Image (cartoon, rainbow, N blue to C red):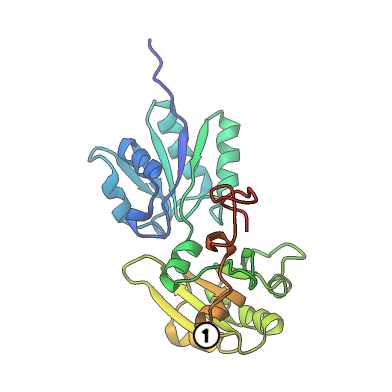
Amino acid sequence: MTQPELHPVLFVGAGPGDPELITVAGRRALEQADLVVYAGSLVSTDMLGWCRPQARAVDSAGLALAEIIEHLASSHRQGQKVVRLHTGDPSLYGALREQLDALDGLGVPWRIIPGVTAAFAAAASLGLEYTLPEVCQSLIITRAPGRTPVPTGEDLASLARHGASLAIYLSAGQGQTVSAALASALGATAPVAVVYRASWPDEQVLWSTAQDLPQDLERSGLKRQALILAGPAVAARFAGQSAPASRLYDAGFSHGYRAGRGQSEDTP
């Protein structure tokens, strides 16, 4: 009896919400899938519009890890093309590692197709550049402690003191904790942006300050699916301040594509 051709399970980043912000590779995976196991509490069901009519879709929102793995592994063994559809990018707060470990234990191959994370959709909505020349050149992606603690040395106040841009995930329900950390590190009046469901039709943007964040979150009712942004670049955007222009496009700054000193185009 001929054995079915086996395909790796594809972990696909759905992007931040807008179905058109999925990558070309991610869309192609959905178009070819026999089974899509998707995070229904976070991924827009409009994404399933890329699938064939005969494809099966399973919402993982109410499933435990073992149940998710059973769907993935059993369909894989039948020779089906299987997609595990994650919100944003699978590498960020996606419980990815435990799924890969379980599939490894079963001898099921997998591949990851990255996606656009909410921090970049939020920046697009705000017209925000996280890495402003001579203002800040780093972006820290983190979260506040909740039911899952953060590692020692990664407390929010310590990270904020670096002066980098901050994209704080999964923390809108921890307004007091985030407020205290940001006020301690950046000052009570430091501007803070909250972007709810970035790129979705019901996206909302809330501007606040480190000290007023808990009250503003409470009034807005935003507790989930909201990203908190802070740091010098956010403050500059709020104030409408211009940063020094990048040297990249300065007529007097030569690089490998302009005559002169031979730097590559991405040299700062």
Q: Residue at x 72, y 75 (%)?
A: 161
Residue at (50% x, 41% y) in the render: 112
Q: Which quarter of the picture shows residue 121? A: bottom left
Give the amino acid at mark 1: Ala
Q: Nearer the viewer, residue 10 or 250?
A: 250
> Vertically, is 99 above or below 200?
above
In percent of width and height, residue 233 lies at 58, 74
Tell me residue 138's x, y (percent): 64, 64
Residue 21 visible at all: yes
173 to 11, vertically: above or below: below
In depth, the one of 9 and 184 nearer the eye is 184
Q: List x then y, in percent, for residue 19.
A: 33, 55
The residue under label 1 is 239
Residue 5 on image: x %, y %: 40, 21
Q: Nearer the viewer, residue 190 or 267?
A: 267
Name the residue at 61% across, 89% down. Answer: 189
- Eyeballing the image, is 90 above or below 156? above
Q: Residues within 10 Å of mark 1 (few under 14, many from 20)?
A: few
Instruction: Report the side of 69 relative to 148 (left or right).
Output: left
Label tally? 1
Numbered disc 1: secondary structure: helix
Image quadrant occupied by the C terminus: bottom right
| Residue farthest top in this picture | 1
**Does the image show residue 217?**
no
**Quarter of the picture holding the N terminus:** top left
Residue furthest left as drawn: 53
